[in-house]
Image (cartoon, rainbow, N blue to C red):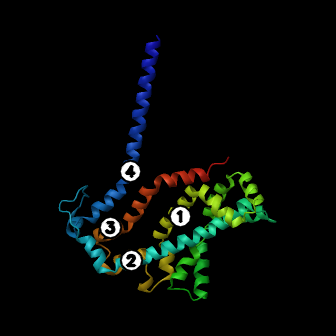
Amino acid sequence: MENTLEKNHKASAAVRKIITYTGLAVWALMVLFPFYWMILTSVKSYGEYNSEYVPKFYAASPTMQNYLDAFSTVPLGRYLLNTLVFTVITTAIMLVVVTLAAYGFARLSFPGKDLVFTCFLALMMIPNELVVITNFVTITNFHLRNSFTGLILPSVTSVFYIYLLKESFSQVPDALYYAAKVDGTSDLRYLWKVMIPICRPTLITVGILKVIECWNSYIWPRLITDEQAYFLVSNGIQEIRENGFGRENIPAMMAAVVVISVPLLVLFLCFREKIMAGVSRGGTKG
């Protein structure tokens, strides 16, 4: 009787495992398929792509000409460099701003702290479109359009990242802070020597998410720049679509998108464990 129950238990466990892995495999195919289609389209010639009345899941004559065109028709290399400068500077300034803000909310005591933090969280309810309009008017009034300063300033802080980092800082025991103050350690030194090393996974997560956000920025660069010297890759894609290859040359556009997407994919694959660790730490109390 026991052997029969044990066999039934093992059989049911095996069935559950098969169902689970089958579901995960199907989900993985659904997630990866757009990337496969993007790469596949980028290696199809213009004629092959437009001659397919029924889309094919393979390229009969793969070509790299679309990638060459992406760099020759528009200065995509310059746009990539501009995007790199914009991303690095914005992320660096943002990390300083949100770290100091999160530390203040997590460790310092001042009148109205809870009210101020509640108001900060309430800002997350404001649609991004309204913020974009306000930022555009402000940057225009300060004559900062077509400049890296105008591109960077509206992106140097984030309520969500302050909240995420504040939750991570709050998990550090208060005893460490009181012991440091007894030894005469300043708040900035305590932040630098204790809080940042302990909460490094969350900081890395915030930094990587900000890099991805800046790299994929589309609406703001399109609004604030109309000089080619300050174009980012988002401007380049639109320029390719409108003035380079034409609206119908989808393979060439996909080649440019692949070039732009590769750095982010590599970044995520290299730091995926730290991203998961940082998010789980920021979302766990105690």
Is residue 173 visible in the rendered image? The answer is yes
Q: Secondary structure at mark 2?
A: helix
Mark toward the start of the polypeptide (2 vs 1): 1
Query: What residue do we see at 54% from left, 82% from top?
Result: 149
Which residue bears the numbered disc 2?
236
Please report whichever mark, 3 or 2, sits nearer to the chain's N-terminal start.
Answer: 2
Q: Earlier in the sequence, mark 4 or mark 3?
A: 4
- Residue 250: mark: none
Q: Is label 4 or label 2 in front?
A: 2
Residue closest to the eye, 21 or 82: 82
Q: Which residue is mark 4?
A: 30
Q: Marks 1 and 3, Cα distance to the nearest angstrom?
A: 27 Å
Choose mark 1 or mark 4, whichever is in front. Answer: 1
Q: Are the two marked residues, 1 and 4, in contact with CB atoms closer than 8 angstroms?
A: no
Three-letter amino acid code of the residue under disc 2 = Gly
Residue 128 position within the rendered picture, expressed as x and y whole percent measured from the top left: 58, 69
Q: Residues within 10 Å of mark 4 (few under 14, many from 20)?
A: few
Residue 132 visible, this angle: no
Which residue position holds label 3? 254
Q: Position of residue 167 (x, y in %)?
A: 66, 55
